[in-house]
Image (cartoon, grey):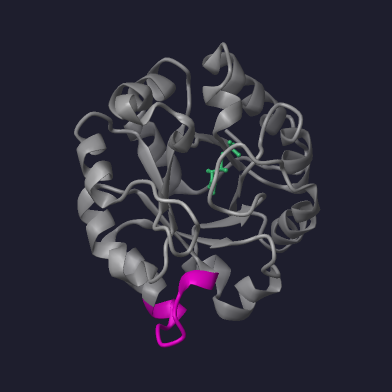
Amino acid sequence: MKCFIAPSMLSCDFARLADESLAIVKQNGADWLHIDVMDGHFVPNLTIGAPVVKCLKKHSTAFMDCHLMVENPQNYVKAFKEAGADMFTFHLEAVPKEVQIVDLIQSIKDSGMLVGVSIKPKTPVESLWETVDIPSMVDMILVMTVEPGFGGQSFMADMMPKVATLRQKYPELLIQVDGGLDQNTIKQAAPAGANVIVAGSSVFGAKDRGAAITGLRQACEASPALSEITHRSALERTARGKQ
Ligand SMILES: O=C(CO)[C@H](O)[C@H](O)COP(=O)(O)O
């Protein structure tokens, strides 16, 4: 296995969140559920928080990949852990100066969740390794390929050099891309080195969601830039969530 496909639940029918979550994994073959958490401050949109994840966890054992687009992410680690999140991804730009990023990362690790760190399009990729020792502290880097806040935007191909640089430096890292991914743009993201693919509108808007996921997976798996995923914990949790 070379890639994880993580449909963004932002594009599903929120009134049917449990059913949509179950179906997208069990019937349509997704690996993870990507949960977009927005606070109306860090991004100009409001979505869902830990209480909804907690309810969802009663219906689905799928890997919950929680992307926190919120200010002060350090305040939400405990709530998301208790809700059942598997991955806690925060934005580098959202951490206040008085909070040490390494302390935040340590608290996520101590809670048992995997650690993701995300950057917005205008944030230079160097700021990641200037701030943290990526291989020892971080499970996944999320390179945003749209300005965070809304689904349905156009893929920013000019983010691909960031992905390629990260892949070259960290051959084993989970590198996630999020925003505007579809059957065409995956052909740029996967060769650059992305191996965790978030897709909202192109999956939930497809007539055949299973075929949309299969298409993303095939394009990703075909990329010579990627080797087999060796992240044991992510693989184990994913497999458990698909049983
Ligand atoms: O994080 C997000 C927006 O901030 C969404 O996950 C992302 O935009 C996915 O939606 P789409 O595939 O429709 O672009």
Residue depicted at 59% across the width and 14% down the height: 211
Q: Is residue 126 magenta-colored?
A: no
Image quadrant where residue 143 sits: bottom right
| Residue 26 horizontal/vertical position (percent) | 38, 19
Instruction: Tell me the magenta residue range.
Output: 93-103
Whether residue 243 can be seen here: no
Residue depicted at 70% across the width and 60% down the height: 166
Image quadrant where residue 222 sits: top right
Q: Is residue 98 magenta-colored?
A: yes
Q: Nearer the viewer, residue 235 or 208?
A: 208
Q: Viewed as shown, does residue 15 lie left or right of 94? A: left
Q: Nearer the viewer, residue 101 or 67?
A: 67
| Residue 124 horizontal/vertical position (percent) | 71, 70
| Residue 116 horizontal/vertical position (percent) | 48, 58
Q: Nearer the viewer, residue 192 or 118?
A: 118
Residue depicted at 79% across the width and 57% down the height: 161
Q: Indicate which quadrant contains ligand 1.
A: top right
Up-down relation of residue 20 to residue 167 (above or below): above
> The N terminus lies in which quarter of the figure?
top right
Up-down relation of residue 134 to residue 3 (above or below): below
Q: Residue furthest top?
A: 207
Up-down relation of residue 117 to residue 29 (above or below): below
Residue depicted at 22% across the width and 44% down the height: 54
